[in-house]
Image (cartoon, rainbow, N blue to C red):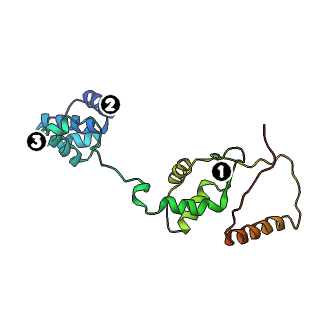
Amino acid sequence: MNPYPLKVEQQMQRFYQSLSEKDRRRYAAIEALKLEWGGITYISQLFGCDYYTIRLGIEELDDESAMSMRKVRRSGGGRKSAFETIERLDATFLKVIAQHTAGSPMDEQIKWTNLNRQEIAQLLKSEGVAVSVTVVDQLLEKYNYRKRKAQKRLPTGEHPQRNEQFENIEKLKVSYQQAGNPVLSMDTKKKN
């Protein structure tokens, strides 16, 4: 087998890089078939692709259904979504975020959380559900959570008993819920 001249090899490599995954393996297969014995090894080294990728391309060239395939990959390929593979993902997410949810008193559709994506992922992991922050983003979007950041414009200083009011509110909230009563959180500063 005679290799191609250097200039032709460079043109072939540039063209190969411009193709989709499916077209790359088929182009590599055609080039390997043109060279006959040793062609697969030569083309594999020239394009930096796997030997078996070229073998797959050769099989596809003879397969009418594969040649009529429009997509780069066959349907059903790739990793399944976390929503499909992790049981009780939604329920666990809602449980984890429940104590960290706030909303607009003017629009019940607007809600937010004081947790960041990494904190939510850590809380889910502590519940036995390990997911990435990308999945957390998808969950936040699915349940209509908005990104919201607390804005503190003036420093108010520190007070030793600052946290007491919040602890008292949390105790009252828990006792009301245990008694079967609803708990409402309202922001009394209406915005126009």
* Residue situated furthest left in the rendering: 37
- Snapshot quadrant of residue 158: bottom right
Q: Give the residue displayed 44% in from the left and 55% down from the top.
A: 83
Position of the C terminus by quadrant: top right
What's the amino acid at mark 1? Trp
- 14 on left or right of 35: right
Question: How much space separates mark 3 and mark 1, taking CA atoms?
Answer: 64 Å
Circle on res. 112: 1
Residue type at tag 2: Arg
Dot 1, how many residues are within 10 Å of its Cα: few (below 14), some (14-19), or many (20+)? many
Residue at horizontal 88 percent and vertical 67 percent from the top:
160
Kind of residue indicated by mark 3: Trp
Q: Position of residue 150 (x, y in %)?
A: 74, 49
- Identified at 24% across, 39% down, the residue is 25
Q: Residues within 10 Å of mark 3 (few under 14, many from 20)?
A: few
The N terminus is located in which quarter?
Answer: top left
Q: Give 129 or 183, whichever is nearer the viewer.
A: 183
Residue assigned mark 3: 37
Task: Choose mark 2 or mark 1, whichever is in front.
Answer: 1
Residue at image point 52% right, 49% down: 142
Work out how far the residue at label 2 is from the one at label 1, CA to CA, in angstroms.
Answer: 49 Å
